[in-house]
Image (cartoon, rainbow, N blue to C red):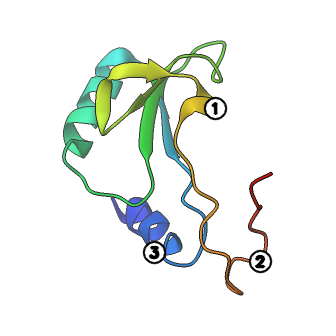
Amino acid sequence: MAKLRGYERLTTFGPRYPVLFWVPSRRREASLLNVLAGLRSASPIATAVHCPDPAGRVWTLVSNPTHRRHLHELPSDHGPDTVTNPQRFDDL
């Protein structure tokens, strides 16, 4: 949980990219989802079980664990356009 607090601090001045947990088994994923259930976070948190295609439809958002998503479908935000976030990408 300490690591998640660090990511949460980052969102105040930087990007809000998904925090990903890549776990070795469905049992471990279910346990982690149970621990993280109800946690409020500015960054989306997603879990997946080790597999050959991490970009595939294997990611579960903690906020909606009933639906698997592709990696590119996870929500993200480049963060505020400020001096503390100089590498922010503008939408094309």
Q: Using residue 9 as the reference point, say whether residue 13 is left or right of it.
A: right
Q: Earlier in the sequence, mark 1 or mark 3?
A: 3
Query: What type is the residue that disc 3 sits on?
Result: Arg
Q: Earlier in the sequence, mark 2 or mark 3?
A: 3
**What residue is shown with label 2?**
86
**For the point 34% across and 58% down, which residue is it?**
41
Query: What type is the residue that disc 2 sits on?
Result: Pro
Residue 91, above or below 7? above
SS category of the residue bearing label 3: helix
Residue 84, above or below 40? below
**Which image quadrant is residue 2 in?**
bottom left
**What residue is shown with label 3?**
9
The answer to whether residue 43 is visible is yes
Residue 46, above or below 15? above
**For the point 57% across and 23% down, which residue is it?**
70
Q: Quadrant of the N terminus?
A: bottom left
Q: Which of labels 2 and 3 is toward the front?
A: 2
Q: Which of labels 1 and 3 is toward the front?
A: 1
**Crowding near the residue tagged with mark 1, few <14, some 14–19, many ≥20 C-alpha atoms within 10 Å:** few
**For the point 20% across and 35% down, which residue is it?**
34
**For the point 54% across and 16% down, which residue is it?**
57
